[in-house]
Image: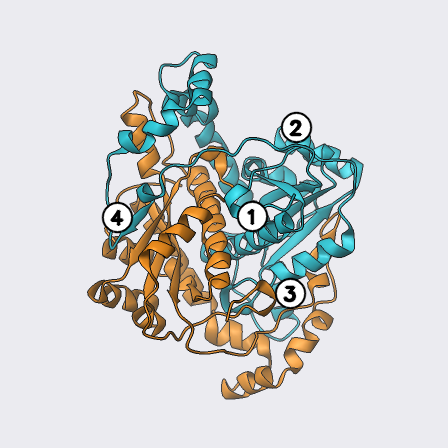
Chain colours: A orange, B cyan
Amino acid sequence: MKMNLADRRSIRRYTDQPVPQERLEELLSLAFRASNTGNMQTYSVIVTRDKERKRALAPLHFNQPCVLSASVVLTFCVDFRRFSDWCLASDAQPGYDNFLSFYGATIDSMLVAQAFASLAEQEGWGLCFLGTTNYNAAGICDALHLPQLVFPVTTVTLGWPDELPELSDRLPAQGLIHLESYQEGDVKALYAAKEALPQMRRFVEENGKRTLAQVFTDVRYPKESNEAFSDALLSAIQRQGFHL
Amino acid sequence: MKMNLADRRSIRRYTDQPVPQERLEELLSLAFRASNTGNMQTYSVIVTRDKERKRALAPLHFNQPCVLSASVVLTFCVDFRRFSDWCLASDAQPGYDNFLSFYGATIDSMLVAQAFASLAEQEGWGLCFLGTTNYNAAGICDALHLPQLVFPVTTVTLGWPDELPELSDRLPAQGLIHLESYQEGDVKALYAAKEALPQMRRFVEENGKRTLAQVFTDVRYPKESNEAFSDALLSAIQRQGFHL
């Protein structure tokens, strides 16, 4: 099945069929046509196929099974290393070890990652973005031998789909689109349909909470955990050579 | 002309024909189907059509003419405000005023922005991403009345194309794809074809430099300027309520 955006879903279960390396590289090359700052192309993609290396990555992604079962794991990285090395080899003094450069390269890495995701889904592959990349960035740097000025932004597990999960819900688009300036809307009305979904009611009940929001604040993304991982993320960025 | 990734180029000149609001919202709604963290949808899009508001934005984007000539200017924003307001209205204590949440929402905003860009280009529209969003973020927050926990990540100028610029060059993809772990390659060889392009040689000459890299380090993106804008970006993030 080829997915378009309208019916896309994250795919976490894959068949044993491998994703061919040549076609993978063709689609990555196409994705590199995405827009980028100053045409500096300050990103890199690490392709993990080796089973041992997947085993090293898995705990860094909290042992999500898709890391091991995917044909390929792709780690999209900020990369100011290559550009800076080119500067040094060209009698030029690079000055890209700063947060502005890091953040701009994050944006460019994501343009490539989503451009690739659209192509891969049209190809019939299934994939899942792993936000856990930002939780254990330092460990991922070690596992993939990322040098200074290279930093993992997002991870995509990729393979041929072996499931067709339900489409996930979305908020009414009108609540996310603001005409001319930011408009504060009626937030309870905006979330009413989501809160009424049977799977959301079940989710609240299973977690022993009274409201859906409490599942997020108390169970899934609690403040203390966010703040501890936030400190780790900031340290990892600095360890890779970007100063704040 | 409908652009696919293979022949995409940034479009900075537009005809007078407007981009219809209804179709714009349809494509944004589709783009909101992109993957996102925990299905929290922590992003917003500000749609600028009003001429006065474009005039307020233009200097913040260093007066790039496309801001005024575009039918629509879209500012894609991190938005943890709506989600946090929902938590507060649901007897839940939000804890998302941290860098991890900010960075994750940046990633999700970019998934939406690139998903939208692909759809818009297939629709026959032309667009340009403006990296200047990160240079004058505080001013953009003021111009668009962005409240706490909302932050502008990237800007897209959008309209019907009135130009067909040359395709820009790209580095050989092999230099950006790393098998199993990061591989340091021969950087001079990787950049050789780019440096040999007639327009790049002209670029070096016009700027009175000896190497192409020096045009980047001395003219386009010099260290002192990067660092000053980096400080401004970090301040703007904190001013919007995300602590580091």
Front-most of residues B122 and B244: B122
Q: Is residue A212 visible?
A: yes
Q: Looking at the image, is mark 2 or mark 3 earlier in the sequence? A: 2
Mark 2 or mark 1: which comes first in sequence? 1
Q: CA distance from mark 4 to mark 1?
A: 30 Å
Which secondary structure, mark 2?
A: loop
Mark 4 and mark 1 lie on one chain; the one further toward the N terminus is 1
User: Are discs 3 and 4 both within one chain?
Assistant: yes
Residue at image position (61%, 59%) is B31
- Labels 3 and 1: the sequence-earlier one: 1
Q: Chain of mark 4?
A: B
Q: CA distance from mark 3 to mark 1?
A: 39 Å
Percent x, y of residue B223: 41, 27
Q: Position of residue B58 (x, y in %)?
A: 68, 32
Residue flagged by tag 4: what amino acid is it?
Tyr
- The lab-note entry on whether marks 4 and 2 share a chain reads yes
- Residue holding disc 3: B85
Kind of residue sitting beneath label 1: Asn
Q: Element type at marker 3?
A: helix
Q: Position of residue B206 (x, y in %)?
A: 48, 13
Q: Residue under circle 4?
A: B182
Q: Which dot marks residue B63?
A: 2
Element on which disc 4 rests: loop
Q: On the same chain: label 2 and label 3?
A: yes
The kind of secondary structure element at disc 1 is loop
Instruction: Please report the residue visible at 68 percent of the width from the left and 38 percent of the height from the top.
Output: B161
